[in-house]
Image (cartoon, rainbow, N blue to C red):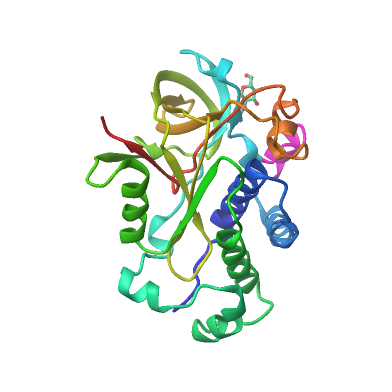
Amino acid sequence: MALSISSCSFILFTLFFSLIIQESCARKINNIMEVEKSHHEEEHNSHKDHHLHQNQNQIEPELNVFFVPNDLKLGKRMPIYFSKKDSSKSPKFLPKEESDKIPFAIEKLPLLLDFFAIPKDSPQAKAMKYTIDQCQFEPMEGETKFCAKSLESLFEFANSMFGSNSNFKFLTTKHVTESTVPLQNYTISKVNKITAPNAFGCHPMPYPFAVFYCHTQKGDANLYEIVVEGEDGGTVEAAAICHMDTSKWDADHVAFRVLNTRPGKSPVCHFFPSDNLVLVPNK
Ligand SMILES: *[C@@H]1O[C@H](CO)[C@@H](O)[C@H](O)[C@H]1NC(C)=O
């Protein structure tokens, strides 16, 4: 089985991971940052959009996903980066019976690398270690987290959050019409606020099969379905969240650099990339 992570989705997911991690606490993310950095460098050396990077005041294009609640006004225009990913290249879910049989523990990493024919010390091996580490960390105060290694276990987690047999829906970011460029100015044309205390977000992790890191933080109940119209005519239905209390965040969190603020001074909102899932109870 091959590990298929395109370097672009890899960067985004590492970005979102550092986001999750830093949101929760200031845990050690040195390993993955190294991976991320080397990927960034590779990207930049070969990237046609290099000039965008320089025009955005040192903000990498992919970081144009942060905003503040005040921005959520009809007619507001802002640059947003919506990745275009080929979901056919993402790792697939295994059936629960299969994924349950595969060990998922840092002690078993050598065995896993062997099993998936992944060279030790490769970026994929580092990414697998990162994924297992993140999944094994204890949740922070007020956080509930879970790594789903199958769709069945994702649904089981939803049942445990929302009550068994409850209805829920997925919020995702969808391109309604094709955009030509990932970063462009978009105008907000619709904002729908969803207040759902138990809603949780799931982020894909790099692994040979689909693993989603799902988590929810107490007090972060402000979810949004936002419709934005791109300058090239592309319409995106975007899922977003506003974290109202950022006082416990790491001061080095990229969001503070992008929004030019600091922990506790301002809420931080962000759009979800299209491969993330937000699960919301359906009333
Ligand atoms: C968005 O619009 C502003 C102001 O018109 C412009 O300076 C900026 O380059 C645009 N950004 C993108 C990504 O097109």
Residue in view at x 42 percent, y 55 percent: 86
Q: Nearer the viewer, residue 45 or 169?
A: 169
Q: Quadrant of ligand 1?
A: top right
Q: Image height check: is 158 above or below 244?
A: below
Residue 95 belongs to the span the image colors magenta: no
Residue positioned most to the left: 165
x and y percent of residue 103 in the render? 48, 77
Residue 59 belongs to the span the image colors magenta: yes
Which quadrant, please, contains the N terminus? Answer: bottom left
Q: How many marks?
A: 0
Res 135 quadrant in image = bottom right
Q: Image height check: is 105 above or below 6?
A: below
Res 249 quadrant in image = top right
Q: Nearer the viewer, residue 246 or 165?
A: 165
Residue in view at x 59 percent, y 47 percent: 16
Q: Position of 234 compared to 15: left or right? A: left
x and y percent of residue 75 in the render? 48, 13
Q: Nearer the viewer, residue 111 or 36?
A: 111
User: Which region shows up in magenta?
Assistant: 49-60
Residue in view at x 50 percent, y 85 percent: 115
Note whether residue 49 is visible.
no
